[in-house]
Image (spheres, rainbow, N blue to C red):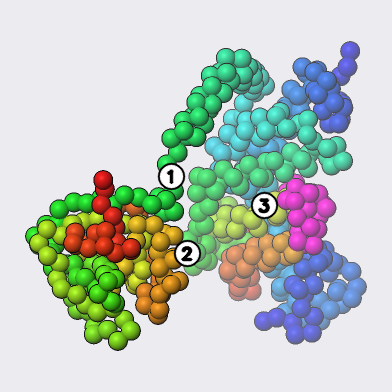
Amino acid sequence: MSCSQIPLLQRLTVESPEVVRREPWRSHLAECPACRGEHSSLVRSLVMFRRLEGESREREFNLPDWEDFSRLLDGLEGRRGGFSRLRVPVVAATALMILTAGLLFWPADPVLEPRPARIVTLKPEQHRQLRVVTREPAQPRFVTDATPIPPPPSSSPVLGPPAPPGAKEAEVVATAGPVARPNARENTAPVVLFRSLQQARTMREASGPWPRAPLNVMPASTPYVVDPAFIGRSPHAPQPVR
Amino acid sequence: VVDWDSQDDGILIQAHLKGNPIAFEVLFRKYREQVARLTYSIAKDETLAEDIVQEVFLLVYRHLAKFRQQAAFKTWLYRITVNETIRQLNRNKRWQPLPEGDFEPANLPSTLVTFENGVSPERVLIEGEQRRMIQNALDAIKPHHRTILVLYYLEDLSVQEIAEVLDIPEGSVKSRLFYARDNLRKLMEPVLNRETDDAVKGTHVM
């Protein structure tokens, strides 16, 4: 039960419980059993807290004495001095070597820099994972899996023939289209392969509604299955390593 | 001959910064138990309280030159202690609130003296199982509430000093104090209600 006239505990938000010793709190407490109960409960809780917590911390702690602590300080100071005298030149030289090596051998940006395609022989069981999609006969594009590709509208690319034996696996850096995983059987939408992100962006901007699809930037080592017959023939297809 | 033990903190700090080898030792001896007690009150962990003394005074030793003497050294020391205690507790995942059943008043013996009966609460006699139940309720106070209650009721710091220790506005200290008191009252209420019921029935023992 709480008091509806004077919310005591709310008042105690900004005051201490001792405020109730003043008027008009004393007279209100005398009349209101709800506030009296709350106040009593609060004060007794605080008394318990003070007493028991106060007692429990008056124990004997096994604390370090000054001799222990000063030895620790001496050790730290000595270690810090040794570090500064002997190790700083070594650390500086090591950092300089790492920095130089980083500047010399830092890899080129795998996405923005064109990378040569990694061509490997396609396994026989992977042949049917490749379909060739063309919008026009002169512009072949490559897909990772064509089963089942829905019939495309007239403005979209059309499904080409299955990949021939001897098709290759190539490394790409970007794809346009909803498919992010290469060579997956559940991939059902056409995907265009690009060797550079710039090429993919250019292609996407210049094209119609398709393949203005989400541009998936792939890890540089992602293998894609491509038909060697189309390598070099499409401006968007991976190029073989020379 | 200077009696360093009777010097105030500001003079000791200045002397230490000027290279006096005694001054920091005096500060260490003067405050090490207070640091341990404060940590123990917050963390309820004796081992941590003993360990933290060393950590706190190492921090003080390293950063004493940065100490601005606008605030009291004790407040600054408490700030380091509270921060270090909470940091250690978070690191060790030692915030483990007790299960609620531990302080349910189901089997509480009725040996408490009630406040209503005109007996001073300072004379409350708490022993055995009853004390354990109450202590369990007190141990279940949330750590941030415990910290502010300890600083206010056990360390007797003012609201302004607590604001400096916790680095929060005074209004926030008052607000936290309210919620801490309320948390304490709610945890203790089952125990206290049981005690009151027994007192009304005349079953309590003095």
Instruction: Determine the CA span between mark 3 and mark 1.
Output: 54 Å
Q: Where is residue B121 in the image (x, y as percent from the top left)?
A: 72, 59
Q: Position of residue A155 (x, y in %)?
A: 33, 84
Label 1: element kind:
loop
Amino acid of disc 3: Thr
Residue density around tag 1, few if under 14, some if 14–19, many if 20 or more, within 10 Å: few
Range of the magenta residues? B153-174
Question: Mark 2 or mark 1, which is nearer to you?
Answer: 1
Instruction: Tell me whether circle 2 and circle 1 mark residues in contact (CB < 8 Å).
Output: no
Label 3: element kind:
helix
Depth check, front residue: B34 or A52:
B34
Please say whether residue A76 is one of the residues in the magenta stretch: no
Instruction: Determine the CA span between mark 2 and mark 1.
Output: 63 Å
Q: Which label number is shown at residue B147?
A: 3
In this rendering, the answer to whether A48 lies above or below A192 is above
Side of B27 where B195 appears, left or right: left
Q: Could you tell me what secondary structure mostly forms the magenta stretch?
A: helix
Residue A123 is drawn in which quadrant?
bottom left
Side of B92 where B179 appears, left or right: right
Instruction: Tell me whether circle 2 and circle 3 mark residues in contact (CB < 8 Å).
Output: no
Q: Where is residue A238 in the image (x, y as percent from the top left)?
A: 29, 58
Q: Position of residue A178 (x, y in %)?
A: 34, 72
Identify the subunit bearing mark 3.
B
Q: Name the residue under label 2.
A: B101
Q: Which label number is shown at residue A108?
A: 1
Q: Which residue is drawn at 80% across and 18% down?
A: B19
Residue A71 is drawn in which quadrant?
top right
